[in-house]
Image (cartoon, helix red, strand yellow):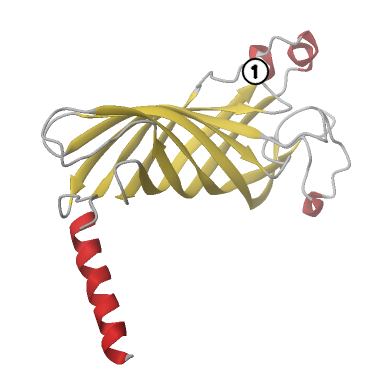
């Protein structure tokens, strides 16, 4: 039994050492908020978003992906198409930090061992944890800080296209929506700690936010061998 366990561990170690290839890089783009305040457009970046990401390519069709992205999330009622929001005139400005872990699936083979330039569209999903500052809006309609921050979970849904660029460099362009499990990001539903009774908007809908940008990653590690010997 002991010899069998040693053999299995040896085989797995050999397979991983020859199968994995790593990517590490940056994310640069913009963000926009979708909720009870501001524009109702889905893709309308109005604030910068910066981050770092890491990928572990398990095969030529899927990769494990982790990222940390920071953005100054903004929204203004004057940018909305809804005349009621324009008349209300609220403004929202908050710091947002997202930590994400998920999987990336490509529609076609994306074998980094290929010596030719290659590209492929991809989907990404998983789980995000988002930290945001808490706010509320008193009778004067001015955004007021609660001086606390909260975390919420969410689901990322990203569509993109990536391609090999120059030696060991992969560039990607993507648009990603985040559905969160909270309605507190813009302050339409104050936290219980604020003791503020005033709410606005649809309290049955949770908040969304979008990231639109590019990724630039550097590949390193063993060349991938996705075959089974």
- Please report the residue visible at 73 percent of the width from the left and 39 percent of the height from the top: 183
Say left or right for 176 vs 109: right
Q: For the view shown, which residue lies furthest in the bottom direction?
A: 2
Query: 201 or 190, which is in the foreground?
Result: 201
Whether 196 is drawn above or below 2: the answer is above
Residue 216, position in %: x, y? 27, 35
Say left or right for 190 vs 151: right
* Badge 1 element: loop
Residue 84, position in %: x, y? 80, 13
Query: 12 or 3, which is in the foreground?
Result: 3
Residue 135, position in %: x, y? 70, 41
Q: Residues within 10 Å of mark 1 (few under 14, many from 20)?
A: many
Whether 125 is drawn above or below 44: the answer is below
Query: 145 or 15, which is in the foreground?
Result: 15
Query: 62 or 39, which is in the foreground?
Result: 62
Q: For the view shown, which residue lies furthest in the front direction?
A: 229
Q: Quadrant of residue 229?
A: bottom left
Query: Total label count?
Result: 1
Whether 9 is drawn above or below 15: the answer is below
Residue 194, position in %: x, y? 79, 49
- Please report the residue visible at 48 percent of the width from the left and 33 percent of the height from the top: 158
The residue wearing badge 1 is 39
């Amino acid at each position: 039994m002991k010899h069998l366990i040693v053999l299995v561990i040896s085989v797995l170690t050999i397979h991983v050492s020859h199968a994995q290839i790593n990517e590490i890089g940056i994310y640069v783009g913009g963000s926009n908020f979708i909720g009870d305040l501001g524009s109702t457009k889905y893709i309308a970046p109005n604030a910068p978003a910066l981050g770092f990401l890491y990928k572990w390519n398990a095969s030529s069709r899927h990769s494990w992906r982790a990222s940390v992205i920071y953005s100054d999330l903004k929204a203004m009622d004057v940018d909305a198409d809804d005349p009621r929001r324009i008349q209300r005139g609220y403004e929202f400005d908050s710091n947002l930090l997202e930590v994400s872990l998920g999987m990336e699936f490509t529609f076609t083979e994306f074998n980094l061992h290929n010596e030719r330039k290659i590209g492929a569209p991809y989907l990404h999903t998983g789980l995000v944890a988002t930290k945001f500052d808490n706010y509320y809006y008193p009778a004067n309609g001015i955004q007021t800080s609660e001086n606390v921050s909260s975390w919420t979970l969410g689901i990322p849904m990203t569509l993109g296209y990536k391609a090999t660029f120059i030696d060991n460099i992969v560039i990607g362009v993507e648009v990603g929506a985040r559905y969160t499990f909270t309605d507190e990001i813009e302050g339409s539903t104050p936290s219980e700690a604020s003791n503020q009774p005033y709410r606005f908007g649809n309290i049955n809908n949770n908040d969304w936010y979008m990231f639109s940008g590019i990724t630039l990653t550097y590949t390193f590690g063993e060349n991938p061998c996705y075959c089974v010997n």
